[in-house]
Amino acid sequence: MILPGVTYYQVVFTLPSELSELALANRHEMADLLVGSAWKTLSKQIKSEQDYDPAAISVLHTWNQKLDSHWHVHLLVPGEGPSLSGPTWKRALSPVDSASSDGYHLVRVDPLRQAYRRRAIAKLQRLRRSGKLNFGGKFESLRNDADWDAFIEKLESKKWVAFIQPPPSESSSANQVVRYLTRYLTGGPISDRRIRAADSKEVTFMAREGARTGGERSQVPITLSTTEFIQKWCLHVQPNQLTKTRYFGGWCNQRQAAYRSRCEELFSALDHSYDSIDPLETAGDLTNHCADLLCPAYGSDRMELIEQTPKPTWAELLDRESDACPAWYGAIQQMDFVRMLWDKYGIGCEDWDMRNALESAKALEPKRSSNDQLRLPGFWRPDPLVAFDLIDSR
């Protein structure tokens, strides 16, 4: 439930690199540890410092731009809410001694980081004591108590990353902030537009890198072997039953209806025209409240689903003759196929392919006149489709 006029923050919590690597063999456990510790820490601090009932939506990510294992969670959090101490609406305010000069403040960041670290490490200790952590490879030694204690001591000495990001500008609306977060809701670890070149040996793509958290703003080309690129990409395929998006506090399923009703009552009393924009809304008329949201062509504030495209299966993605197959992967498969033909038939493989295509066409259409052209598909797939135009010389 998004209320225009309310400030929304993005809060990001990150696991240290050691735990991001350990998470590869403990995905469900570390996802619960990360997301649960982040929300419980933030919720407790909002209640303590700002005295309002918080809510959040979280999105789990397991990668950075270089496709390394980099576990972090993005949370969208309203900077206002129903008061915990009375029937009023409370807005997050900066403390008197705050050095903030931009007018935005959710909670104190340093105590947030420290509390997040304590809570996450305590959860990690409980997981080990209950035998729910898998150790192997470089982490095999952590089965030993002394090595485990040293590992925990190292984690406690590190500065864990948690930062609060206000809206991009003072003029940013609630909808703009939500649209910004939706970029994290869908898609995989890398988009096609970042891939600059790919063949059977190497893949080159653009990525941020640098000492600053999250990398520098400018991007540089990164080149990996094709095998290494595929291995890194596959690290971020989430297993079944691992929830990527979760709702907390007032936005969780159990409380959503009551929380919404309370927000509507308290927020409307602030001399706001209550404009609630809810993607899950199925009832109520927003036309009188949200005239600026009406479609200029049809005057409607509703969208109608006209087409739905299901996600392709892995079999479709890896089939070079499927429309869902990425062009760069299909190109690699094409090259392998051509090399196989070359090795098998030698320098005359092109003649063999042309002759085979022509003979197949003759068998299918034996009664074509000599003036007709045969348009025969070649072996180049999937994109673009190359066809041979051959003249039957009978």
Image (cartoon, grey):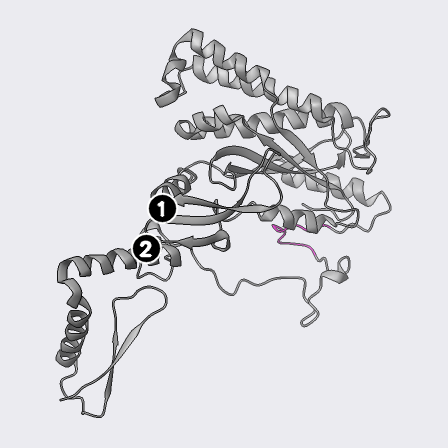
Q: Amino acid at mark 2?
A: Ile
Position of residue 115 measured from the top left corner of the image (x, y, whole percent): 64, 20
Left or right: residue 74 compared with residue 102? left
Q: Quadrant of the N terminus?
A: top right
Position of residue 282 measured from the top left corner of the image (x, y, whole percent): 62, 54
The residue tagged 1 is 226
Q: Secondary structure at mark 1?
A: helix
Q: Quadrant of the C terminus?
A: bottom left
Q: Residue at x 51, y 32 (%)?
A: 71
The reply to whether the C-beta atoms of the residues labelled 2 and 1 are less than 8 Å apart is: yes
Mark 2 residue crowding within 10 angstroms, few (<14) / some (14–19) / many (20+): some
Q: Amino acid at mark 1?
A: Thr
In the image as oriented, which residue stretches furthest toward the top?
146
Position of residue 2 measured from the top left corner of the image (x, y, whole percent): 69, 46
Position of residue 154 measured from the top left corner of the image (x, y, whole percent): 53, 15
Is residue 263 positioned above or below 274 on the image? above
Q: In terms of image quadrants, where is residue 52?
A: top right
The residue tagged 2 is 332
